[in-house]
Amino acid sequence: MSGTTAPPAVDWRRMHPVTPALKGWKIVVAVLVVVGYQAADDVRRLLELVDGYRWVVVLGGLAAVAVVGFAYSALAWRMTRFAVTDDAVHLNTGILFRQQRQARLDRLQAVDVVQPLLARLVGLAELKLEVAGGSGSGVSLAFLRESDALALRAELLALAAGLQRPGSTAVAAGVDGAPGALDGDASTGAADPTVDGAVPPAARSSVAFEAAPEHQVYEVPMSRLVLATLRSGATVGLVLAAVVAVAAGVLSRTFATVFFLLPMFFGLVSYVWSRINQGASFRAATSPDGIRLRHGLTESRAQTVPPGRVQAIRISQGMWWRRPDWWRVEMNVAGYSPSGEQQRDTVLHPVATRDEVRTALWLVLHDLGVDDPVGVVDAALTGTDEAHGFAVAPRRARWVDPLGWRRHGVLVTQRALVIRRGRWWRQVDVVPHERTQSLGLQQGPLQRRLGLASFVVHSTPGPVSPDIAHLDAGVVVALLDEQSERARTARASEGPEQWMRKAAAPVVVAGQVGAAEPAPSGPAVAPELSPDPVAGPGASSVRTEPGAGA
């Protein structure tokens, strides 16, 4: 008898049978758009197509396209299947050319439940798994019954956290009452604690993991979202362009210039609608699984970002948001594409007040490692001097940046690197030390003559590109050495990818195990932005402590 044990059989599953109907109509719409675009250039030809009995031929052709589209979608559904093991999600697709994909759960960056309008009407949802590995590394399971998608999300998050199904030999040490555990075997999430040995695929797929509890920390009012969208720079720019066009028409006694505003108007309508549609009903909550975000009007999205997956944060404010003091908070998450439809997935708060900014920052970074976290955040948002230890640009930087040089500043704390810049369009970037990918120093010819340099932090693709320009060259060199050492030390002490298998004792809150710290139980006013009692308070400025280590 062989000394090796054969791997257990994989339980393959298919998508919901209604999936072909939800995907087939997209082919019909695409054909209509192409034909309409081509025929719109010749109105006479378009009228000829619907004259007499030709419309019957047009409808027949459209019906043929619909039949082919739905038949192809049905065949693709038949050839598509997926399976979930303890280590990965496997997806097989393709009709002529077969494709096998595997998403490792220990590299799981985010799990999203997406419900387009038609899918929501029939109670279906799409489950998206974002995995570290660049663009195209994610896996999409579309479509599943909504309840099945939510149960599968809980299962994947539990497995990614380090919990095990019954019969697994590797059980998370010290985990008791973990999220996803049922009555019985709390350490494995098993319904039957007496099960021993290998489990058949049918029993393996029937093991349920309960969704971890959550606590909502903020919600964006619809009125604030609409008003903030209307106060954006795009709206103001269109109003100014309309005034100029009307004035030019009055002076030239012709209003032909007004027609040039039509593309801008339609672009503005699309921009306003997309911002409102994506940010409607925006809510954020904390759970042992990580950060949970829900938003969307016609397309509902429920994101779950596991602990420690956010690589960097950007807090930005346009000129027209100054008076109400509103801010937009975005993040870099490994696996999310920096462009396309996933731009909406990188928003941590679409329009936040000052208190909500602190709360959003606390969701990602529970401790800044400073004595006065509120004062540091305020200094980063609106400060222009060396208060709270910021290293600022020297006065000679005004020759290369006469307007914004006073805002340039950088601060190294025990837990993160904080960069601020922008006088009219303010930006603050926060990068946890352990999330630093690489560092760079840039210096142009004029900067070399003035003794200045720029410091660049390389992060994963996303809306956040941390960099600070026109600092003293000596400060940048010292910052490069110090941050390299801090990032190296932070990564070494970060721990394993599966957050339920931390070496330290788990934090137990009401029978649940938290990822690193318990979920808050009171109103979310970010009181947890406090100094680390173990690491010690304080923020070291590279201007006064060049080359300091971690």
Image: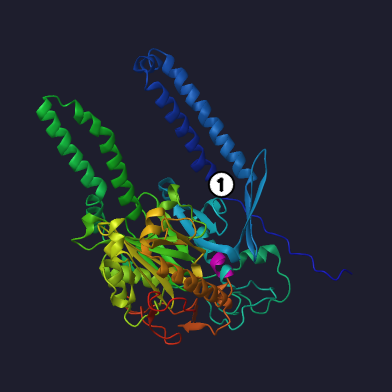
- Give the colour scheme shown: rainbow
Q: Kindly give the residue lying farthest to the front in the view shown.
A: 449
Label 1: few (<14), some or many (≥20) within 10 Å? some
Is 61 in the magenta? no
Front residue of 24/320: it is 320
- Vertical comparison of 492 with 154: above or below: below
Q: Is residue 82 visible?
A: yes
At label 1, which amino acid type do we have?
A: Pro
Residue 509 coordinates in the image, percent (x, y): 45, 82
Q: What stretch is highlighted in magenta?
A: 155-159
- Residue 260: quadrant of the picture: top left
> Would you say residue 307 is visible in this rendering?
no
Which image quarter holds the N terminus? bottom right
x 25%, y 67%: residue: 382
Name the main secondary structure of what is drawn in magenta.
helix
Label 1 element class? loop
Residue closest to the far top: 52
Q: Quadrant of residue 328?
A: bottom left
Give the left or right position of residue 314, taking residue 169 as reference: left
- Where residue 514 appears, as percent x and y from the top left, is 48, 78
Residue 337, percent from left and from top: 48, 52
Residue wearing tag 1: 17
Q: Is residue 243 above or below residue 133?
A: above
The one nearer the camera, 221 or 180, is 221
